[in-house]
Amino acid sequence: MATGRTVPAMDPGGPNSETKRSSSDVSANRRRWKANIPLLLMFIPGVLFYIIFKYLPIGGLMIAFKDYNFADGVFGSPWVGLDNFETIFRQPQTFNVIRNTVVLSFLNVFVGFPFPILLAVMLNEVRRSWYKRFIQTVVYLPHFFSWVIIGGFVVTLFSVESGTINNWVEAITGQPYPFLFEEGSWISIYVGSGIWKEMGFSAIIYLAALTAIDPSLYESASLDGASKFRQIWHITIPGISSTIIIMFILSMGRLMEVGFDHVYVLQNSIVSGVAEVISTFMYRVGLQGGQFSLSAAMGMFESLIGFILVLAANAVARRFGKGLW
Amino acid sequence: MKSTRGEKIFYFVNSFILLLLGITCLFPLINTIALSLSDLQPIASGRVTFYPIGWNTDAFSMLFGGTRIIPAFWNSVVITVVGVIFSMSVTIMTAYPLSRRIFFGRRFFTLAMVFTMLFSGGLIPTYLVVKSLGLVNSYFAIWLPALVSTYNLLVMRTFFENIPDEIDDAARIDGCTEWTYLQKVVIPLSMPAIATLTLFYAVGFWNAFMNVLIYINETSKYNLTVLVQNMIQSQSLLQEIVSTGEQVQVVPESLKAAGVLVMVIPMLVVYPFLQKYFVKGVMLGSIKG
């Protein structure tokens, strides 16, 4: 095995393309091939999965350039070039869906970003460890709820007839407010529920970074008379700044992503002007309405923009020496 | 070190804000429990907030007697248990070769898999693939498209790679084959990562929603998430359930709340025991980044 180790990684076509080699090389290669057989065998199911459920659909994106119908299938349907993409940008309805996707995901990423940092810094300043553990347990919990559960919570709390929040609003203003049926408040609830669900769990990564800060820094700062806020500003935040940068770049990759479940459970027809996004459009118009090509084109647009954003984010990250690849 | 007065105030305010935050996280749950157990009158007049007013378990008896929630619960269990077994087996079997330096095309395969995290065909082409395989209306449409999560795969591979080479060398000298080495050495040494990923997959399958909505047509095959979502969203369905109950009277709010609770309770029961694994999982993933 020791000789197998020293052979550098090469693709399977590699060894045959070389013409000259010594006999020891050949036997080492044969041994390596033999050692690879069990590995290849156990690798088969995974490769099949990636081919069938990841790469076939990427190939299937060709229907975005076709006028797909069930009778002719993916290959038989006629090509239409960029017609579907033209339709997307010409129709106000589809253009609106793209705008909504961009607006909601931007709000999600940018408004939501500081909350886990703030939470981690605050948790870091708790002195009693049982209290810290208790708060952590509670704030991590919503991460594990499905969006259906959270949708149930939201509908119950904000309902006009008997929601608890609206009872409070009614007690103050004398009028219940249709939170889920006004565009502005719907967007706030959308963004807020996302923060509520993920704030605690996203804080874990920052809490880990905080443990690396040298406690003696705080002691000497405190002796020098630095207030708590100054300590946080000058020691804590710089101490986790590299983590903050990485997380920020990673979140760029999600800029075109609006999860289906999150929107679907909160949506209603009255606010569809701001609440219909690409993923729900693909479900409603694509799958239920049978407009496969049009919605596949939309999905492709979403994927492409997302892909470009990740590449761009990584290029920026490299400048900071923090590139992911 | 003695804290100054300013620091004492800071610590107090800090703990207080965190307490409020904790309450915010728990409040929807508490409110839901209260609603599911309250009498009709207090719910209708909106007096139920933190604790049940009156005591009424009719919502639960109606839920269990008048809806398909019990079969849906078992469907969720089947989806989760079988899905986790499939996913974990394939994830381990795929991650292990990728962690071996002698494996041909290791770099190529890793890149090809990571690429699918960055770019995907999306909903429509995936649906067409699942449909053409004849998987619609079968749970394989839930299990197979979600078989391997590339993120979990990379976490697993990184964990395998960190097993010391000395163990490997010793096992080879003893004549260990790849399969026995994986079973007898690698898997037992990787239990922390395996536990964490099992939980990640389990939460994913338990909360599965979109795939069930898309691929499962028969209502008898619905899992909890889709059934409860239908109850929450469709007012007419709720009215129908409520009006079929003859003796008992239940307000829709109470029934919705009970439905949500049936979905939450299993999660709450296991959550305290599993919390540390989840936290560990996030750390495992961050090593690579």
Image (spheres, grey):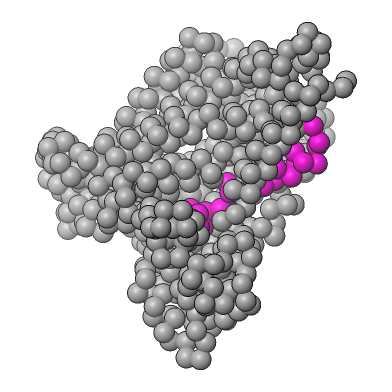
Q: In which quarter of the image is residue A203?
A: top right
**x and y, in percent, of residue A252 in the image:** 43, 27
Question: Which residues make up the magenta segment?
Answer: A127-155
User: Could you tell me which residue is drawn at 18 percent across and 45 percent down?
Assistant: A93
**Image quadrant assignment for residue B48:** bottom right
Q: Is residue A161 visible?
A: yes
Q: Between residue A281 and residue A222, name the one nearer to us.
A: A222
**Residue A178: x, y in percent?**
36, 55
Question: Is B51 on the left-hand or right-hand side of A94?
Answer: right
Residue B157 can be seen, yes or no: no
Eyeballing the image, is B248 above or below B28? below
Q: Which residue is drawn at 57% across and 77% down?
A: B39
- Nearest to the observer: residue A239 or residue A183: A183
**Relative depth, front residue between B126 and A256:** A256
Residue B86 among magenta residues: no
Place of residue B224 in the rendered image (x, y in percent of width and height, measured from the top left): 51, 65
**Above or below, comparing residue A119 to residue A249 in the picture:** below
When the figure is inspected, residue B69 is found, relative to residue A279, above or below; the finding is below
A243 vs A111, left or right, is right
